[in-house]
Amino acid sequence: MSTDDQLRFPDGFLWGAATAAYQIEGAPQADGKGPSIWDTFSHIPGKTWHGDTGDVACDSYHRYPEDVGLLQRLGVGAYRFSLSWPRIQPDGRGQANQAGLDYYRRLVDLLLEKGITPVVTLYHWDLPQALQDKGGWATRDIADLFADYAAIAAGALGDRVHRWVTLNEPWVVATVGYRDGRHAPGIADPAQAVAANHHLLLAHGRSVAALRAASPSPAQAGITLNLAIFRPVSDAAADLAEELDARHNGAYLGPLLRGAYPERLTADYSPAKVEGLVHAGDFGVITEPVDFLGVNFYAPLYAGIRQDGEPRRGEELIGPHEVLVQPEGMPVTAMNWLVDAGAFRELLVRLRDEAAGLALYVTENGSSWYDYVTQDGTVEDYERLEYLRDHLTAVHQAIAEGTDVRGYFAWSLLDNFEWAEGYAKRFGLAYVDFGTQRRILKRSGEFYAGVVRANALPGS
Ligand code: IFM
């Protein structure tokens, strides 16, 4: 696979970039779109940094040709973007809004014209507000409504879209949205979070079947999980690291691949607790075979115990004594996330065994830094470039160790609305001046274009 000191990727490796509807589109009321939970949540004072909202974001709803131009400059073969459910069904149920579908059709047509394969995520967190008003993901009938929506999307776009991701990061949806309340819908209720989790998985399974049935041409379907590596910082934290792993990874890989929640999650999923929630036959739905697994990776997490219950500087208290630690001397990004590409390799190699037989796509990987435009009008983001190079090296190593990674999507094509962090945190390969909407390809974007062109990482 390697010539000279270049690291070559397998022939046909799919290079891409990713975005999500609410983070880039803006135009929250255009062409009959209904409100989403993020439209509501971001307008509540104090919920996002600086009161930022996605009202304008990158204005991609109007500027998508320019963004397709950026993809062309990167030379990528694929673009992963998400559909806004309330653009397509303003209330989350019933008849489709043709104007919403037409927007995505125009985007897909332009991508195809430029030789870029669309990879479409059905749900990247912008639930129709009307469904949340009835309980959202904590209610069971949402699984069928989601399947209906999947069928509408596949029926309308499936002649030209052949690769679908059902859900993006259900852990974040359930945990950050329904348990911690830091994301929309802003609910802090552990019982609703467990229910949301189960219904997300159910919705995934039902939508895979629905979109395959509705698509006019063969559809490949998968789900994207934000999987993580947990490392204990001491022997005392070993059990905590295992528990976190089960909650974060096992709660998804278990049901999806093996048809069961991990045994050690009895606190949340004991038979008594899930009575009424998990119905007979649910795991048959959830294990609906998928064509691939999407993996999002950003950072490893280090688990520690503080007997005094006092987190030290840079630590996050996650229980009475349990903390997430930032080990001394390890670099962190602007998100305060650790930088450790070795953990990425470890995760991918682990999936080689745990998800054996399943093709993997890295559907997101990237980093946030405090970028700025130089006097020459360039963005010299060498930290991002290094992060990218090191994490691509990790992918290359994992492939060499027998992991079936078929593609890589950089997060993100362009700076965008980073949820509760608003516009303060930039992840783009292209810089966005949110005052003028001007896009500037960053140094890391130029580097990525070189990798894509060569299908290889340059030698050192
Ligand atoms: O911006 C998000 C994205 O929407 C989901 N995955 C993580 C990214 C960075 O936080």
Image (cartoon, grey):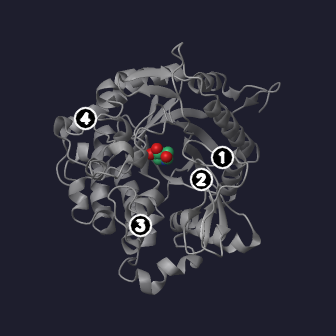
Label 4 or label 3, whichever lies nearer to me, is 3
Q: How far apart are marks 2 and 3 (CA)?
A: 31 Å
Q: Is mark 1 on a helix, strand or loop?
A: loop
**Residue 38 pos. (x, y %):** 31, 49
Q: What is the quadrant of the N terminus in the image?
A: top right
Q: How far apart are marks 4 and 3 (CA)?
A: 29 Å
Q: Which of marks 4 and 3 is nearer the N terminus?
A: 4
Q: How far apart are marks 1 and 3 (CA)?
A: 34 Å
Label 2 or label 4, whichever lies nearer to me, is 4
Query: Mark number for residue 358?
Result: 2
Q: Is mark 3 on a helix, strand or loop?
A: helix
Q: Name the residue under label 4.
A: 27
Q: What element carries label 4?
A: loop
Q: How far apart are marks 2 and 4 (CA)?
A: 37 Å
Along the line of sight, which residue is nearer the eye, 25 or 362? Answer: 25
Determine contact: label 2, label 1, CB under 8 Å. yes
What residue appears at the point 50 percent right and 54 percent down from the top-left corner?
290
Query: Mark number for residue 8?
Result: none
**Image quarter of residue 322:** bottom right
Q: Which residue lies furthest to the bottom in this view?
A: 272
Q: Name the residue under label 1.
A: 404
Q: Name the residue under label 3.
A: 179
Q: Is residue 159 above or below residue 135?
A: above
Residue type at mark 3? Answer: Arg
- Relative placement, left or right, of 264 versus 71 is right
Residue type at mark 4? Answer: Ala
